[in-house]
Structure formats: structure tokens, C-alpha cells
Amino acid sequence: MAHASADSVLSPGDQRLVAALQCDGRVSAERAAQVLGVSPATVRRRLHALIGDGVVRVVVSPVARPRGGGAAGALFLRIRVLRGKLDTIVAALAARDDIPFIDVTTSGDEIFAVARTEPGSRDPLVFRQLPSTQAVTALESATILHVFRVVSEWRHQVLSPAERAALDPAAAPPPEGAASPGPYGIEADAVEEALLDALAPDARLPAAALATRTGLPESTVRRRLARLAAQGRLVTQVLVDPRALGLAIEAKLLLHVAPDHLAAAGRALADHPAVHGAFATSGPSNLHAAAYFTDLAALYGFLSRDLTGLGITHVETAIVSRAVKRTPALAHPAVG
């Protein structure tokens, strides 16, 4: 299992290990080895290399699915700027805590971003700061109305359905009448929130380390982690450059869908193996999606075949040239 350089692709074995982590970010070496058909020593060695080299990070998802499918407080921004001013505007946006995601497209003058905001508010960034910036030539914003898929739910398609099912730790729904929603869009009490906060930058921290960081007994940590995982409330995300998985193309899709087809089209996109994000939004493009592809031919096939019959009346496609910001930061392949 070789590791990737900045312009190479992970070996098939390493890609399968990444996919196993997508199913269960805290999967043990023994369990991964059993399902993947390799030795535990191989799994430990490759995990140490992938994580140690910065190729892969496993975190608690900052955009775990909100309760009820909603995503109140998030805006999609599409910003066009004067040529020559792109880097300046990107740097200013990247410095803001309320902007967790920024992508630059291949057009050379276009930025896609996500902004956190209060639902229905006159957000200063959208209403005053960006419009008054002379380098900004156009600004579109759309409120996320419903979440069909978030990136933590996307799975690299290198495992069989049986392998994915064997790795899935969720066994039961969250209990009725649980505590109020926590910062990660799930139900959590104070102890669970403390564990999730400690796990946020590194979801594979062992129970002993978590006990030290939180001041909780290790037995309590193990019991609570097991309950969170079994109930599907420990939502992890694998951060890895998609190019290391052989997915060289990322596309943003802005879709116009007839209202009576919107829900069905959103679900169909969420079920598509290439799509890592799908959202119903305000505005004329009432369905936004993001997807990974091996090459432009695969993107063309998706547009010409897979979007037919969904009630889509218009599609605008933007290809991402650079993923500027992810919160937490995206893992990148190490050189060497």
C-alpha cells in the first residue's frame, strides 16, 4: 500500500482503508483488517503512515446532518470579482470564522463559499461588506432550506455493500426525549458534548486520552462513546484530497427544478455515488449539488444521463480549480 504524493493516487489498498474510515472513523485495526481481508499489522502501519503524513484526517463532522433535515443559518455565496483581485478577496474571506468553506472555480474570477448567518437576517457580509467592495462585481446568495446529503455521508465507492454494512457502527436510532441539540446538529447531553468537543480535531483519539482531556473516568468515556456510535450520533468525517482517491474533478451544480419534482430530485442526487452534497435552496437555482468525478468524461456522462427524468429544467456547472478552505482544514497528500 503506497502513499500518495501531491500529484499521485493512493494505492487500492489505501483507498479501501480510507473508505473503511468513512464508514466508521473509530474503527479498530482488528475490525478493519477482518472486513478488508488484510492483517491488523498492515492496517496499523498504513493508518500510521496516512495520518502521520497528513494524507488523511478523521474529525467529528462540523456539518453533521441537522435535525429534521434543516440547515438554518447557512448561505451559499457565489461571488464574482475583478480579474487580478481574486487572491485578495479569497484571503479576506478565508480569514473569517463565519466562512467555513471556500472554493475557486476554473473561470478565474469566481468564488463559491458558505457563510454561517442568522436565518432571515440582513447579514452584514452580504448586505454591506461585499457589495461595497469595489473588487466584487457580482454577488448571489441562497439560503439552505433542506439538506439531502452532506459530505460526511459520502462514501468512496471501493467497498462492497456487504463490507460497508459490516463496518457501520450504527445499530439503533437515538432515544426519544434526548437532550437539546448540541453544536454538531445532534442530540447530546453535557458529557457527550464534552467528548465531541475533544474529538472534533481528531476523532480517533483513544479512550484514555479522552479521559485525560475531559476529566471523565475512562469507563464513562468508553460507555458513552459506544452509545454515541451505536445510535449514529458520533458523526465522523474523513478529510482527504479527492485527487488522492483518483477523483480529479469536483463540480458545483446549480439546478432549476420544478417544485413538484424538487424532493424527488434531491433524494436522487443524494443517492448518487458521485454526489457529496445536495441541498434545496432559495433562489432560482433551487437545488445545489457538489460531486466528484474521475475525469471530464465522467462529468459529461453524469450531466447527459444521470440528471435526465428528474424534472430539471436548467443546469449550470462550475468546475472547482482550488479548494481554498475547509473547516476543519482539508488533508492534503504529502510529497515524497
Image (cartoon, helix red, strand yellow):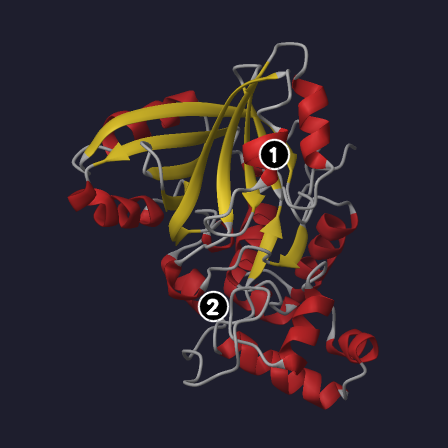
In the image, 289 versus 223, the foreground residue is 289
**Neighbour tally class for label 2: few under 14, some 14-19, many 20 plus, Cα within 10 Å:** some
Tell me the number on the disc at residue 170.
none
Q: Disc 2 designates what residue? A: 168
Q: Which residue does the image show at 60% across and 62% down from the upper left?
A: 25
Q: Which residue does the image show at 61% across and 34% down from the upper left?
A: 9
Picture quarter with the C terminus = top right
**Neighbour tally class for label 1: few under 14, some 14-19, many 20 plus, Cα within 10 Å:** many
For the image, the number of numbered tags is: 2
| SS at mark 2 in the image | loop
C-alpha span from label 1 to label 2? 26 Å
Residue 235 at x, y percent in the picture = 54, 64
The vertical placement of 61 against 296, above or below, is below
Write down the quadrant of residue 225 in the picture: bottom right
Residue 198 at x, y percent in the picture = 73, 68
Residue 146 at x, y percent in the picture = 37, 52
Residue 263 in sight:
yes
Q: Which residue does the image show at 62% across and 67% down from the upper left?
A: 26
| SS at mark 1 in the image | loop
Q: Disc 1 designates what residue? A: 9
Q: Amino acid at mark 1?
A: Val
Residue 292 in sight:
no
User: Is 74 positioned to the left or the right of 61 in the image?
Assistant: left
Residue 214 at x, y percent in the picture = 78, 78
Disc nearer the start of the sequence (1/2): 1
